[in-house]
Image: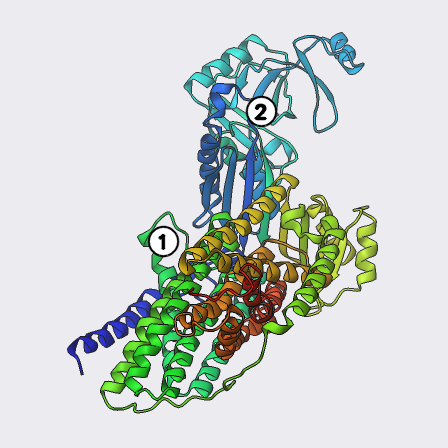
Amino acid sequence: MKRGQVWQIFAILALAAACLWVIYPPFDIKDKDGKVIKEGKIKLGLDLQGGMHLLLKVDTSKLPASSKADAADRAIEVLRNRIDQFGVREPAIQRQGTDEIVVQLPGVTDRERAIAIIGQTAMLEFKLVADDPDKLKQAISGNVPDGYELKYSEDNEPVLLEKQAVLTGESISNALIHFDTNKFNEPGVGLEFNSEGAKKFARITGENVGRRLAIILDGKVQSAPRINEPIPSGQASITGRFTIEQAKDLSTVLRVGALPAPMSIEEERTVGPLLGQDSINKGVKATLIGITFVVVFMAVYYLLSGLISDIALILNFLIILGSMSILPYLFPGVSATLTLPGIAGIALSLGMAIDANVLINERIREELNLGRSLRMAVDHGYNRAFSAILDSHVTNLIAAVLLFQFGTGPIRGFAVTLIIGVVSSLFTAIVVTRTVLEFLMNKGWVKSLPMLHLFRNTKIDFIRSRFIFFSISMILIVVGLFTFFSKGERAYGIDFAGGELQEYMFKTQPPMDEVRKALDELKLGNAQIQQFKENPRVVLIRTAIDKNKLITDKLKQKFPDQEIQILKTEHVGPVAGQQLRAKAIYAIIGSLIGILIYIAFRFKDFNFALAGVIGIFHDVLLTLGVMAMAKIPIDLLSVTALLTIAGYSISDTIVVYDRVRENRPLNRKLSLYELINLSVNQTLSRTVLTTGVTLLTVLAIYAWGGEVLSNFSFALLVGFFLGVYSTVYITSPLVLAFQPRKKVIGK
């Protein structure tokens, strides 16, 4: 045995050990009280650990031109200070574009309080109240005197204020919660001015004894006490109908400063801890079951070669988790957060990793059938499978990179795991399995590689029926697209159409007629109410506008004994929905262009690339139509599925194209028709097996991944099945349509 091979085996074992070391513990280890004893190495996304994702838009329309440029940056600093006071662990705040800010708050599920703290402008002003009753009457009648403005207090008392503020929140040095002993210990906020502010406040109160001084927060009169005497202490207070928590939060936002401009919430996603833990359990279960399916199949079908492939599969799994653990330390700007779609991405990438091993094993089988020795068959099998493996992995990488570029939130988590999975599967399939197999052969422990066989030398004329299948596909696409577009905005989920979605869990299964009756009282319009088949205690409510608090309060009032819990809240504004839809279109178009360029370059024939891209369109459009007919809305996860289908569809096609490229110089007398037919028959077993093995993991996600991933996995099931169909009956025959009728490849 070569000495270098010993080092290769040692390096593989060292890599596996290193991955195990950097992974442990993968998740937080907690004591019985829920306190974290040891932090996990893998960072969980908000959809798994619970928390909030907010996309905020800074309204700079009323700011002077000189202040607009850095308004978002100043807002970020204020938000960071507020959130630090809020005590959020590992928050993420970053600028997006010119006037948008993305805020992620892990573990925060008190939606109302978080939004109040983050979204409150906290513009504090002190304004003198006009003491002329005639001017007040004039203002109430609709004729507000110049230099004044009419406001109403919390008690609906009209208050005429001088427009010019005599003092602002910029003069505050501190703000603390305090209790008014004169009002039954009612909570309020005590203000302390800085030295300059204290001087101004003393002068203002000294010059206006007997007048009222209104305290205005974000345009609302909080109180308007009378100045009985000069106040030289530099202290004041804000009173109102505050709870202790509201007073505490108000003191926080006043203490860290006001936002430079108002902000609106364009997109919000809140996941409760209960749903997060449930998602982890179901996602991990689906992944383990999917891996088990694949491991058992490979061991049974390919025997020893399958066991070696399983070793590579397990190492691939460790590399993915290890990379996610260490990537943020190597590249601080890159987030390797594990999301629920990310778990699906791991399961999917493992299924795709096996594809490479299927290609290699099938190639080795062919070489053995030609009478070559085991060592030569292994050598030729790996060499001849390499081009198809490389091409299929690169095309999937193109789709994954574009998904990361245009995706958002959890979708990026899917893209990250898919990118890592594609790269690691290329390494484990080409390097690891070959090293292990050659090690066993050199030791003399392996002298043959028996395998089961699915198809034996088929000679089916697939091309002859091409026009029939072209017609069938065209009809199905037209029907599917008609169904999709006839739905209008109803064809899209919250992500693209905008609106709000709430998911509630009841203690027991609620009567849906009573739920609908309760919501009808709120006059929500076209509200959609859905009860999950998997768990009938869970009710999903979708509305066109933000009515979260009204709906929650109404349900708790109607069902006081149900202990209703909010599992998830999603809110997407119309502008954000349009932007997300545009990004999705860019991702799909970009991936198709990238794949087209790569295939044309690799096969030196634009006709092959064009046929391949048309095949992708075929699979994506048919899947879209099936989803529309199945009443599955198109959202970000759906786009993720469609892009995955695009990458996987071209992978099947590449297997055939690669065989055509190989057969071309060996069969120069064959027409293009005959050459394609020969290649499709030779690769039929590979085409069916590669997709079939991946479908095992997708089936596991569909069956055990939970409601969140059911639509995603359904789309993949449809798309992968169509990928096999289109490779055999659509994409391969399409090459004929772009060539002269009797042209022979190679001449």
Q: Quadrant of the C terminus?
A: bottom left
SS at badge 2? loop
SS at badge 1? helix
The label shown at residue 61 is 2
Which residue occupies 36% across, 53% down? 328
CA distance for labels 2 and 1: 37 Å
**609, 256: nearer the viewer:** 609
**381, 500: nearer the viewer:** 381
The label shown at residue 638 is none
The label shown at residue 328 is 1
Count neighbours of disc 2 (C-alpha within 10 A) and say few if under 14, some if 14 to 19, many if 20 or more. few
Q: Position of residue 557 (x, y in %)?
A: 76, 53
Q: Quadrant of the N terminus?
A: bottom left
Q: Are marks 2 and 1 in contact (CB under 8 Å)?
A: no
Residue flagged by tag 2: what amino acid is it?
Ser
When the figure is inspected, residue 448 is found, relative to residue 504, above or below; the finding is: below
Q: Is residue 129 visible?
A: yes
When the figure is inspected, residue 544 is found, relative to residue 635, above or below; the finding is: above
Nearer the N terminus, badge 2 or badge 1?
2
When the figure is inspected, residue 707 is found, relative to residue 403, above or below; the finding is: below
Quarter-of-image position of residue 84: top left
**237, 26: nearer the viewer:** 26
Q: Position of residue 88 (x, y in %)?
A: 47, 48
Instruction: Specify whether 699 is left or right of 686.
Output: right
